[in-house]
Amino acid sequence: MSAAPDLNPVEQHWQRNLAVCALGSFTTIIAMTLLLPFLPLYVEQLGVSDPAEIAQWSGVAFGATFLSAAFTAPLWGRLGDRYGRKLMLIRASLGMAVAMSLIGLAENVWQLVLLRLLAGLLGGYASGATILVATQTPKARSGWALGMLSSGIMAGNLAGPLIGGSLPPLIGIRNTFFLAGAAIFVTFLATLFLMKEAPRPPRSKEHKAAARASVWAGISDRRPVLIMLVVPSLLMFAVMSIEPIITVYLIQLKAEQVTVAAGLVMSATALGSIISASRLGKLADRIGHWTVVTGCLTVASLLLIPQAFVTQEWQLVLLRFLMGLALGGLLPCIAAIIRHAVPENVAGRMLGYSTSSQYVGQVLGPLAGGFLGGHFGMRVVFLGTCVLLAACAVATWLFKPRSALVIAE
């Protein structure tokens, strides 16, 4: 194939870039998730006293980052296609370092929400890293590489809540945010000096004309892409609807040391995903990404039922760990399906749209979870999430292409 020379620069640097992206995603996700165990406490510290309002404001503050990120992800993906994906990662890491530090200076809940919006507007390192790895990794290794990157992201999701549960009692909530900003600045330096992106070819008149054309024009079969834009949005809606209510749920279970217990519950999911992500990605490279996506959604939906009826915190930790094992293969496989279904020149934009769809779910999920949990009880959130993931599993099964091998070639 004539494409072989084009792959040489990518093959030369893809493993190094994967290592930088995984490490950078790990540190930035730590910084973004460490606030989860103490977010309701920070909201209360900023002047909100009613328990229902604390749950709602926690959902608003948590989802605000993803709201602004949802609007900017396609823009960053398009600019990455044009000017380079390393530049987008440099921008994201520096912007997140500034925004995270400013969150520690918030004086009321409105400032907290606005600064969380700023973090989403300026950030997006992990999503940018996913685009870079997906587009600059040989297709035959894409499932494994995206699984390894997902392991780095999930490792950050594991460490973040644990750190967030232990640091505030030691150094205070505000200093925790300042430390997080410093950690992201280290990621900025690593990305700037260690990442090596393949040289971008000069943009010909034909290439510029193609870039101005509709992003869908060169996609022969649009159904897999459309499905994989809807499913991740519903997936993240379902998953993130639970995160803001975990601390309140543990209070209802009369857990001791609530922030530590919340950190363990949230980290258990990430630990399961770390263990399974690369393995499920490798399995998907062999048996098909669609099969793995459908299976993972089915298992995750079933595991949500007993979570609504736990009586002790250790039961919730165990069930969230098992759910993490199922969730680990989902986003890497979704990214691989999109990557294989679209032309190279629009891959960044389409993965950006996929990221935006995830962010939409991450915005609406915490809002819905906080509202339903505060007004109708925590069990409603778990059971409603179960139904939503089951519906996604049915949809991927029904609309799976007749030959999924076409997507994997």
Image (spheres, grey):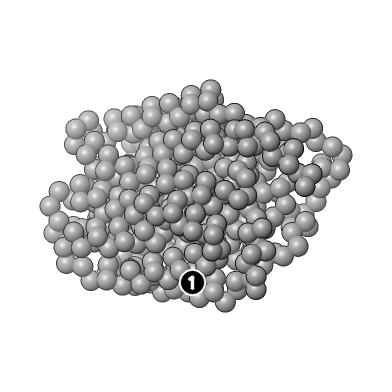
Q: Residues within 10 Å of mark 1 (few under 14, many from 20)?
A: many
What residue lies at 21% left-to-right and 47% top-to-bottom? Answer: 259
- Toward the viewer: 255 or 27? 27
Residue 57: tell me if it is visible. Answer: no
Residue 1 % position (x, y) = 77, 47
Label total for image: 1
**Residue 298, image quadrant:** bottom left
Residue at the far right in the pictured view: 205
What residue lies at 55% left-to-right and 57% top-to-bottom? Answer: 285
**Residue 381, image quadrant:** bottom left
Residue 314: tell me if it is visible. Answer: yes
For the C terminus, the quadrant is bottom right
- Toward the viewer: 282 or 241? 282
**Residue 77, image quadrant:** top right
Residue 372 % position (x, y) = 34, 67
Residue 128 sits above or below residue 308 on the image: above
Relative side of 221 to 177, left or right: right
What residue lies at 31% left-to-right and 65% top-to-bottom? Answer: 373
Relative side of 172 to 350, left or right: left
Amino acid residing under circle 1: Ala
Residue 324 sits above or below residue 35 on the image: below
Relative side of 315 to 177, left or right: left
What residue lies at 33% left-to-right and 42% top-to-bottom? Answer: 160
Residue 158 % position (x, y) = 33, 46
State the SS at label 1: helix
Relative side of 294 to 250, left or right: right
Residue 216 % position (x, y) = 74, 58
Look at mark 1 in the image and give the residue it sits on: 393
